[in-house]
Amino acid sequence: MPKVFGLSMAAFLLWVPPAIQTRQPSRGELGLAQRTMDMAVMGHLSGLRERMRTASDPIERLFDAYALYQSDPKENADCFTNAFPTTEEGLERLLDLNETIPYSPEGEGNEYRDPRVKWTIGFESIYNAYLQRVQAGDPEALKRFLALEGHGDGAVGEEIAGDIAELFHHPAYVLAHWDQLEPHKAFLRSVKTWVTPKEFRSIRNGYLKLLPSNDRRRRVILYLLDHPE
């Protein structure tokens, strides 16, 4: 039998080059994304709800809740909020979706797509949808989102830190959620660095307008604003 690259023809036909092997994504998260998307496309929303309710896997639960949220954001906002991971394992797996779900040229990102729907499953799509819940003022979403601080490497870590910092550009939001945001108040130091002088004056005046002179938060917030990193 002839040989190819020193291998028998039979062995060669079974052999997969290492470069191709390393490009194979993890079947775990990708398989979950595929099954979730299939159920959503077929309209099996009751099945998604039941699987989300009974799932022990935090990413499976998150994918199901996210699909339900995409089907009806108002009705399923709470289940999406409460499905966001809270354990270290769950958070790490969420952040690793850019590795475990393959690159999609159509969306220019690591996401699972189906042409029958407009939404995708991947870190960025889930993260951005959840950030909208945070910005809308959901206290539970904010609590879970803030737990991401310090997680993620490189661009992902910078994106998370940047989005937390951006919350402090909105005085009314910060003061309404001060109990949750106070432990992260050092982000106030970055405001002056990342906005124009005109925008900074507007933000600072917003805090001044909302904080009475006898409010203990006034001195702390103004000091951090005026003393950037």
Image: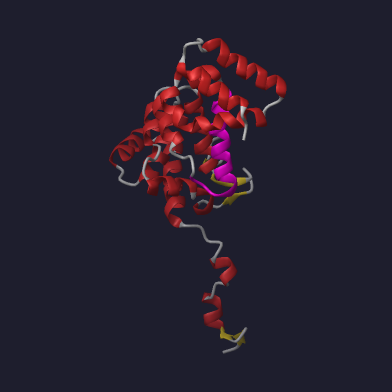
Residue placed furthest toward the right = 197
Q: Is residue 162 magenta?
A: yes
Please name whichever residue, 180 or 85, is drawn nearer the observer in this view of the structure.
Answer: 180
Q: Please give the range of residues in magenta.
A: 151-169
For residue 48, which quarter of the picture?
A: top left
Residue 3, position in %: x, y? 60, 87
Q: Is residue 116 magenta?
A: no
Q: Compared with residue 170, is residue 186 higher up or lower down, i.e. above or below?
A: below
Can I make out residue 190 in this image? yes
Q: Compared with residue 102, is residue 159 higher up or lower down, i.e. above or below?
A: above
Q: Is the stretch drawn in magenta largely helix, strand or loop?
A: helix
Answer with left or right where residue 23 lies relative to residue 50: right
Answer with left or right where residue 150 lies relative to residue 80: right
- Quarter of the figure that contains the N terminus: bottom right
* Residue at (71, 19) in percent of width and height: 198
Answer with left or right where residue 53 lies relative to residue 62: left
Residue 67, position in %: x, y? 44, 35
Residue 4, position in %: x, y? 62, 83
